[in-house]
Structures are given as structure tokens and as C-alpha cells.
Image (tube, rainbow, N blue to C red):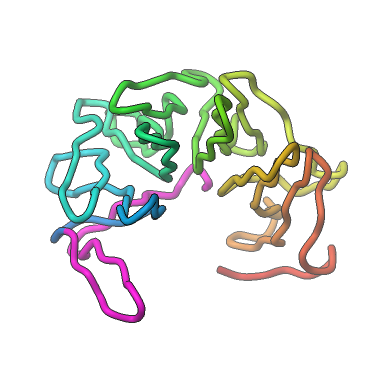
Amino acid sequence: MDSTSTPYSQNTDAVYWKNGQQVVLAKNADVTGIVVSDSDVYVSGGSTNGVGAVYWKNGKMVTLAQNAYVPYATGIAVSGNDVYASGFLTNPNGTGYSTAAIYWKNGKMVTLAQNAYVPYATGIAVSGNDVYVSGSINADTAVYWKNGQQIMLSNNNSVYTSYATSIAVSGNDVYVAGYLQNSNVFGSSVPVYWKNGKMVMLAPGNSIYYK
């Protein structure tokens, strides 16, 4: 997610599909992530009607945060009886820039980074007792946090800026999806992922993909 992204849009419906059948969660809201635990369906997102960051469990909305700093929920994970959601707070003056990368555990907010670093949290995964959150700092550098400790992700010394969009964990391996963006070409990007901090390009390095 770059510094100009806004996950919640006006006049949209929050929905998901089960076996091709649409399930409507709310009006004037967006969905940012989904996970299924046993028979329960959890969906992260938010409302444009002042509710702020929320998730839905089997269609019932749970409010995570609602305050002047415009909270956003960007991803969700479930481990046992615990519900985790990644997100961030934005500047209340309307610039859209993040003031804090955060996550919630059972509704309690944990701050990962804040203020001058322009941090974003974009996805979350839980493995055992460890909490992993993908994101970016300085609005141009991909990172992830493990139990609150920040880990930088390499861009292989390219001239592109880097962004992390989601995260997954399998055994001892940590995978982060994201992209590199050419700051000289507006809207251009190259898809990548990182495995244990090592970047893998999903397209040739000289390819430019327009969103």
C-alpha cells in the first residue's frame, strides 16, 4: 500500500463470495481480508459511515476502533480463540498519510511504529505465539514486524521503492508479497515476494506493470 491509498471507498458494498454466491456484509463499506477458522468466517474491513476499523464474524460486525485518527483494518488472522487484525491510523488533517502502523488482538490495539516514519501495516499472520505483520515505513520501504520487532526487506539495490502487501508463515519460513515501484513512472510497479528476506521477482526486472 502506498501513501496515497485509501482502503475504504464511498458508495460500495462490503461483500464476499462462498462457492460463487455473494454474501453482503454492509452498505458503504469495504473488505480488505478474509480468513476461515473451523466453520466461522472472519472478514476485515471498514465503514465510510464513521464506524472506522471493523471485522465481521459470520456477518456480525465488531468495531475495532473509531476515533479522530481514522483507523483502517487491512487484514485478519485467527489463532484458536484469538482474532488479530492489521491496520493503521491516518492523519486527521485529511492528508491520508499514516501516523501509526498497528494491529489489534481481540480488540486491543498494539502499536508497531508511528509518527515520522509514515508506517503502514498491510497484512497479518500468526504462527504459534508469534505475530507477523507486513507493511512499510517512510512510505517507500517494505518491512515486516515479528512480535513487534521490525525487519527490513531488501529491494536488491534497485532504484525502485518497495511495498509489502501481505504475509504468510509456513514452518520457519516467512513469505511477504509486495511490489517495487518506479518513482519516475507514475503508477508503475513490478510484482515481487520475499522468502526469509530474500526478494524474488515475479516478472522481468525491466517490465513495468500499470495498475
The residue under the point 52% across, 19% down is 116
Which residue is most to the front? 38
Residue 23 within the magenta-colored segment of the rendering:
yes
Q: Nearer the viewer, residue 98 or 64?
A: 64
The residue under the point 86% across, 44% down is 156
Displayed quadrant of residue 13: bottom left
Above or below, comparing residue 82 to residue 42 in the picture:
above
Q: Specify whether 110 is left or right of 61.
A: right
Displayed quadrant of residue 167: top right
Q: Position of residue 21 (x, y in %)?
A: 27, 79
Q: Position of residue 140 (x, y in %)?
A: 63, 39
Q: Which residues are magenta?
A: 1-25
Q: Specify whether 19 is left or right of 1.
A: left
Above or below, comparing residue 5 to residue 115 in the picture:
below
Q: Position of residue 175 (x, y in %)?
A: 69, 46
Which image quarter holds the C terminus?
A: bottom right
Q: Specify whether 144 is left or right of 105.
A: right
The residue under the point 78% across, 68% down is 203
Which residue is most to the right? 157
Above or below, comparing residue 188 to residue 167 in the picture:
below
Q: Nearer the viewer, residue 162 or 81?
A: 81
Q: How many numbered circles are shown? A: 0
Q: Specify whether 49 is left or right of 16.
A: left
Q: Nearer the viewer, residue 79 or 12?
A: 79
Residue 167 within the magenta-colored segment of the rendering:
no
Q: Position of residue 54 (x, y in %)?
A: 25, 41
The residue under the point 22% across, 69% down is 23
